[in-house]
Amino acid sequence: MALDRKDLQEFARRERGAFESLLAEFVEVPSVSADPERKRDVERIAELGAATLRRFGATADIHRVPGGPPLVLGAFGSEPGRPTVTVYNHLDVQPASKETEPWRTEPFEFTVEGDTYRGRGTTDDKGPALTALYGAKAALDAGVPVNIRFLWETEEEVGSPHFAETLAKIGAPAATDAVVVSDTVWVSRQRPALSTGLRGLQRFHFHLETAETDQHSGSTGGAARNPVAELCQLASEIFDARTGRVKIPGFYDDVARPTKQELADFKASGFSVKAFMKEYGFRSIRTKDPMEIMKRLWALPTFEVHGLVGGYQGPGVKTIVPPRAELKATVRMVPDMKAEKLIRLVKAFVKKHAPDVRVEAGSSAAPYKGHTSGPYIEAAQRAVKFAFGKDPVFVRQGGTIGAVLSMEQILKVPIAFMGLSLPEHGYHAPNENYDWGQASGGMVAFAKYFEEVAALPSGRAGRKK
Amino acid sequence: MALDRKDLQEFARRERGAFESLLAEFVEVPSVSADPERKRDVERIAELGAATLRRFGATADIHRVPGGPPLVLGAFGSEPGRPTVTVYNHLDVQPASKETEPWRTEPFEFTVEGDTYRGRGTTDDKGPALTALYGAKAALDAGVPVNIRFLWETEEEVGSPHFAETLAKIGAPAATDAVVVSDTVWVSRQRPALSTGLRGLQRFHFHLETAETDQHSGSTGGAARNPVAELCQLASEIFDARTGRVKIPGFYDDVARPTKQELADFKASGFSVKAFMKEYGFRSIRTKDPMEIMKRLWALPTFEVHGLVGGYQGPGVKTIVPPRAELKATVRMVPDMKAEKLIRLVKAFVKKHAPDVRVEAGSSAAPYKGHTSGPYIEAAQRAVKFAFGKDPVFVRQGGTIGAVLSMEQILKVPIAFMGLSLPEHGYHAPNENYDWGQASGGMVAFAKYFEEVAALPSGRAGRKK
């Protein structure tokens, strides 16, 4: 009674219309967790998530801690003796604006063009979430003996500051034998990839205020301090923007070198400089050496500047001296960097070079070093090969999922990564998209994964019932 | 039959209501020359200007060159044998936005609070323009034998790129014996000031584009170039933002040192560091030495950064690598700096340090070195003392009026500066304002100035008729 690939593909074809309608419903809720004005939409996406899970036959609850956003937990089956597996996705999205970014369609309108689905959240992470849900439906409809949980969070894009506390509060209903995270990106469409590590993220805001309002740059320029320019200078003291090299003493001290096996996996990953540049639309990059690029993406930390707020942003020039500025930056951390030490180093550096700049350390997510073996990871390997016809490679992921470390620590179970996104899908970029090839393949992969997991001995979640 | 101060003050009191209504009409046309979307409003302000001049009894024409904005020339009287004097003001204004700046009122709504008039353009330069117009009315109503011209331009805030050509095209109707410019700022309300020099202005835009769209800073960060950060670095290579010192070789080579007399005038100007900081709302400035500040404001050039466009400007953090950025900057030039040489130096510097940054040199206005003696300047001195009760001091002006040099070169007549604005009026700042004290005093001063000028021998404008 093993699942048949053709049957699963037929299931996906049959469900395609329903899947697209559902994804449209999800994408059209602008659940931007970074924007306080979208708080209501973040609530709405959680309600839609819970309602959808119930419609698919699950029980679903919304959990939260005081001041925190909703966390949706859905449960299909609670049969003792059966393994329980939890699928993690997030339903919040990055900001998007057609006014300031080159979106060809409305970011919060779902559009279909051939096999391509466009809209903010299609690939990060609403599309993969619903793909996994359809995979679960296929497996359960076929009678696969497994308990499935869906854990859908709504603050991943702001670093999951309440996730650990909320998950810990749920307690027993969240118990599981394994977690599979579907929020990662392949190296190329030609080669499925499973992730074995994530970079962490530490947010920083640097604030400087030297006056109350804009002032005339003729009447006051020369004597007036210029916070925009001073923060430019601080950024260039922190790191060399041309090479990316961070100049804060001690910054690289705790960086773990990748193992020989990892470097061999990087080499086998199918990474191509040309494809990387094309998929992400880069005209020039810092280096053209492929191994050096992979190391920089997956195994080295960065200091990145996301925007310098302040001064005049409109057409032409407004000849003012700005009164204040804010530099938005993040550090992508790698194992074994620790956020507390990083914050200490950054604050000490700023205190020395720019004593009246206020450093605000935002939420942080630790880097994650995962595994390349074990029954659940091997199940994912087999499932992906079954669905996409090729052995997946193990690579690390340059991005960050704050919740992963929390799940490992709280649930104490193995975590596998079964991502479905592609570089050209535009994670965090305008014209974000997802496609039916990855969605239908993903449904097959997830269904097969659930079947593979069903064959494993049930773990502590089963025992507890 | 000399004008009496009390009579002129009574005139001002009587006209106050009409003056305020007229200023409101002018302020409520958002004639922002930097904004292409306000082009229609720039046309409207010229039409309103011409109509107003006609209503006051002048003839008025709108002049322009192909592609250029309107330039209004109004004429009261053309009697041969009488001196002709031209008042210069501008009717365009700086950008203003209540959404991004701390305006307490709508910037393009005129509000009155006691003696204070608020709104963009109240002090720069619509208020002084209408003050001078009422001064002319007072003089002409009293039978002062003088021909008066009003030259109202509409692109001062973008560097007057078409002014010279338009003025040259007008020809004979623009001929005059002297120009008085009313677009400068006193050092403090306690001490009237006449300006003897202006800094010039050269606009620069630095552009860098390394990709097509935002990209995920996890998936691409480390390999991707970051144009916002690279332009930060370039800015900090161009100048030390903390001291203001420009590091481009040759930048200071042509700076003329102020004369002993000028330094003595600076010293006598009534400049106070405490008042300067209070009036402009500064919390800290680059130096507290008053003479050093005056030199930096009036006699030394600056490199100023007005804004760094690119990346994410919204709430929180968006973890992207931006694809492009634009640094908006200007250099305030002092005598004897030349724009062509400056542009050459800046381009060579950028080519060396950041070869793929594109430097766009915008419009420029040369620095201006004026006079402290001559019959028209002495007439202004006497008029200001008559109106405000104190001898004015000569100071230079940190700001720029591109048209001044053009008028000197084309009209070949002496130019005097009779400004009425105060530091606390907020030139180019939010909550820009003007006040009845300066307006009513200004009306008296201008009326007296016209009378003083009427007593001078008529010059070439008279002879030509």
Image: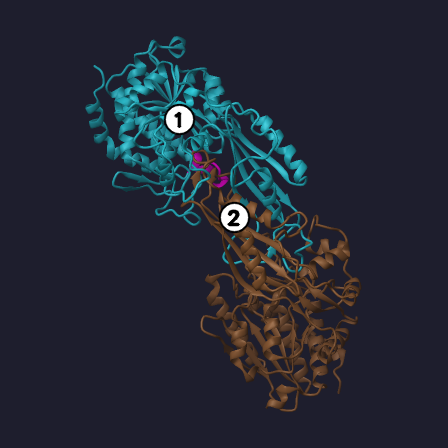
Chain colours: A cyan, B brown
Where is residue B87 drawn, in percent x and y? Answer: 63, 76
* SS class, disc 1: helix
Which residue is rendered at x = 45% and y = 37% of the image? A287
Q: Does the magenta stretch include residue B272?
A: no
Residue at label 2? B354
The answer to whether one can see residue A39 in this image is yes
Amino acid type, mark 1:
Phe
Query: In front here: B273 or B196?
Result: B196
Could you tell me which chain the residue with mark 1 belongs to?
A
Residue B402 location, quadrant: bottom right
Where is residue A91 drawn, in percent x and y? Answer: 40, 32
Which residue is rendered at x = 39% and y = 14% of the image? A177
Which residue is rendered at x = 72% and y = 86% of the image? B455
Could you tell me which chain the residue with mark 2 belongs to?
B
Task: Give the alpha-carbon distance from disc 2 to disc 1, as whole Å.
Answer: 32 Å
Residue range corresponding to the magenta coloring = A31-43
Where is residue B193 drawn, in percent x and y? Answer: 73, 68
Residue A128 as seen in the image, left or right of residue B231: left
Query: In front here: A81 or B154?
Result: B154
Residue at label 1? A266
Amino acid type, mark 2:
Ala
Query: In front here: B444 or B16?
Result: B444
Residue A84 as seen in the image, left or right of residue B358: left
The answer to whether one can see residue B107 in this image is no
Viewport quadrant of the N terminus of chain B: bottom right
Where is residue B49 drawn, in percent x and y? Answer: 54, 74
Cβ atoms at labels 2 and 1 below 8 Å apart: no
| Magenta stretch: dominant secondary structure | helix
